[in-house]
Image (spheres, helix red, strand yellow):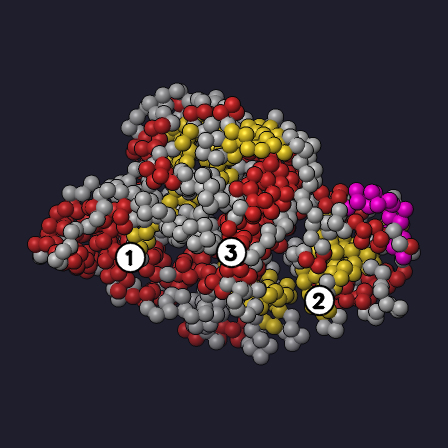
Amino acid sequence: MTFKARYEHMRDDWGIPHLRADDALALAYGQGHATALDRAWQLEFDRHRVQGTTAAFLGEEAVDWDRFARQSRLDDTAQRCFRTLEPETAAWVTAYTDGVNAALAEGASQAPEFTAMGLAPGTWRPWTPLGVWLATHILFAGFPTKIWRDEVARLLGEEAIGLFATDGPGTTGSNGWLVEGERTATGAPIIAGDPHRYIEDPGVYQQIRLACPEFDVVGLAVPGVPGIAHFAHTGGVAWAITNAMADYQDLYREQLRRTGDGRVEALGPDGWRPAAAHTETIDVAGAAPVTVEIIETDRGPVIAGGPQEPSAPSDRRDMVETAGDDDQNPQHAAQPFGSVQTLSLRQLPRVTGELGFDALPALLRARTVADVDAALDRWVEPVNVVLAADTSGATLYRVAGYVPRRPYVNSLRPVPAWESVHGWRAGRAPTPRKRIEGLAVMANERGLAAPLGVEFAPPHRADRIGELLATSTDWTATDMAAIHTDTLLASAGPLLGLLAAAPGLSPDAVRLRDRLLTWDRHMDAASTDASLYAAVRAHVVHRLAAHPSLAPLVGPGRPARPGAYPGLFLPWLAALPRIGFALEFLLDGGPVPHGERIAMVAAAAESIARSLAEPHKSGPGPWASAHQLVTWQALPGTAGSSAAPASAGLAGDHDCVLSTSSTPGITHHSTRGPAARYVWDLARREDSLWIVPLGASGVPGDAHHRDQLPLWVEGALVPVTTDWNLLHRTEEKTPMSPAPAALPPARRTPLHEQKIDGFGTIVLVPVHPATDLDLLYSWVTEERARFWGMGQESREQVLETYEFLDSLATHHALLAVRDGVPVALFQTYDPAADPVGECYEVRRGDYGVHLLIAPHRGAVPEPGFTGALLSVLIAYVFSDPANLRVVVEPDVSNEKALTRMLRAGFVLGPEIDKPEKRARLAFLSREAAAAKG
């Protein structure tokens, strides 16, 4: 794709990119281009995450993720979602990836990670941004928590599930608030907040400005994804989100069996049905490759466990009888103790092909709250609570996203795949909304989104923000830093209450108790009392974990029995962090008797007091000396130490508004915190403020790589620059050039790979029109390809045809490559979006195909050649569960093709008249293909 418009790339004093172009497509290209210059390694790492190829350079530690990425079909789901985009959105996303591809080589030349790993940047496909979004958010709703609840019920009983009904690893801490004009100094609304995530280097959010004649937006983008989804100010309207804590993914407990001919079947409500299955190989740096079987049932991809072999029990009755005592519990009935759990994941993008990307361009063009509201009606995943306001004073407070309708038990734990009651129903659950009266707060609490979820964050942050905002009716943008950095730890109450009630303490412990009871409960960076409290808290967590009522969760192999679940899910199944995060509730009630809770807290105080009384002990240091920021890097040490500089000691704690989360009982270090802070002023956008933890650049050694860190630690913000005259020109691209030449077919990332004994390995790869033109032209213009209808086309016309196909979300051209040699052209299309759809009644799940075999190279045709290729193409089509029937329409005079179709199991349909030919329809159902084997 080539753009004639000018793309200006400018930066402010903090190195934040400000991009300007003549139209939205050129601007999307510019955003991709600028991001690749600043974040080349981050982009390429994310592309490998989507494809499940990170172990090829990171080694064995990355195998768990790669296995999950492939089993959950991330890249394939991204392609499916790309095909459903509106054509304008698909072109916009493609422009972004063209920009990425054009700048990746230059960006990589500045990134030491590429040299360290010996990697060269690859090629982004149009759907890669959708894959990045999926990979970023697939664990966001925390579906492994359902496994945790299942294990808690098994080990402690059903009544114990609610003991840990608080946020799991890395899902909460975000804040957002809106103050209406009646409470501000300017009379216009202010929106502020801070999304909390793992603090990554480079950061997960990118400060950016995108401007063209249609819009001018500042906000926080996700590198690798075009537009600005979550936090933005368009000049007329601003919006922000927090995680709604909704439950919108289901885990199904599957029964799989392998038939005598090697196929896989899954037990569903209608009995045993074929499951799609194939194998893939994960290359591992420094170790042997790992083979992974990819299985997908009618519920979704299998992400844990696998099929029983033919000799194993093969019907449901046999399965249940092997479960022993567990058969009294329907949740465990078909899963004997100690067995590997077989689970499939059902999520909206995989089921419907919808991801919500059509909302992104609409959000950029939004001028009013009504525009934002309408755009968010298209939103799918993740499910968010949204606050928005515009310059007229209008406001919005709603949930956005798609939550499927299904039984409540689906939200709690894995459910049996063979029981029809657990299926999804038509439509989506209503998304709540509420009128704002003066102010509104969102902090992952059980509030507006309560009907859509199970577990929410404690109310402390939301309550504290509301309490602070109520103290004034004269708020300004600069005042909001005081809200961002509030350190009151309301959740300390239960522990301190038990400490106050502890009898018979030693003199040293009494002094410690009195000191903590007079503490203001603020986790300030300089506070030694905060350090003292954290030390006592850690001891209490360990004592609770050792109590007989909870010890079954913490014993060897509990609750994560060896081999029972993928290693990727173990953070959700680690008992000690769960106990630490639920400490407030476990000390306020739960299975440990009140007197024993007091004794635990007293024993912890005595232990800490004795330690402090030892000779040469100077007492606890300031909280910031222990509460250090630890940033995450894909390659620690390549771009400096994996830990932030020593000056990055932090204030705050898990339940503070300044939610810099440590893990009580494990470490005082913080790996999560505000991944950005923002203040959107609707009176004057230029008075808005923002900050990120490190800097705008992802290039180590760049002046803007970590220049915002000291201000971020202090809680300060930097101004949002909107005056173009105050910016520094970086570079200007005019006209924009096309992306670099594509790789030859044999080196492209395959969309499908299949080995046929005695024939070879066939891979299907996308056609790159310009690169493949010589090959395409030579094939389609041969006399033997007369039925293809392009025999009289010029090279320019062939190129134009395939470039047009490449621009469509509904039509695709692929090359079949046999052992490195292209051997066929395979085109697919959505009949409903093709002229053929006007000639017959299109069914849901119909998928059209065309096949052109390359000229054979031998003296005589190779027997079985066409049949082998056709079997691969059919397997590829039906690897997508959404495809239920293959549709072909060969020329009525092409008897050879019609005979081949009948031999493959196709059923002939009516003859139809198309502008270029009279054709005969033929159909192959999924069931007929399975019967043919």
What residue lies at 83% left-to-right and 43% top-to-bottom? 797
Which amino acid type is shown beneath numbered disc 3? Ala
Q: Which mark is residue 665?
A: 1
Which amino acid type is shown beneath numbered disc 2? Thr
Do the residues under discs 1 and 3 have CB atoms within 8 angstroms?
Answer: no
Say which label, 2 or 3, has the lower sequence index.
3
Q: Nearer the viewer, residue 57 or 157?
A: 57
In the image, residue 807 lies at what x, y percent? 71, 43
Q: CA distance from mark 2 to mark 3?
A: 32 Å
* In magenta segment, residue 705: no
Q: Nearer the viewer, mark 2 or mark 3?
A: 3
Q: Does residue 276 appear to the left or right of 532 in the view shown?
A: right
Q: Does residue 292 appear to the left or right of 186 in the view shown?
A: right
Q: Does 52 sit above or below residue 175?
A: below
What residue lies at 45% left-to-right and 44% top-to-bottom? 701
Q: Does residue 296 appear to the left or right of 483 in the view shown?
A: right
Q: Nearer the viewer, mark 1 or mark 3?
A: 3
In the image, residue 56 lies at what x, y percent? 55, 61
What residue lies at 36% left-to-right and 53% top-to-bottom? 165
Q: CA distance from mark 1 to mark 2?
A: 52 Å
Quadrant location of the C terminus? bottom right
Q: Which mark is residue 119?
A: none
Q: Using the rendered image of the protein, determine whether residue 244 is visible from the camera's viewpoint.
A: no
> Start and end of the magenta stretch?
784-802
Say which label, 1 or 3, has the lower sequence index.
3
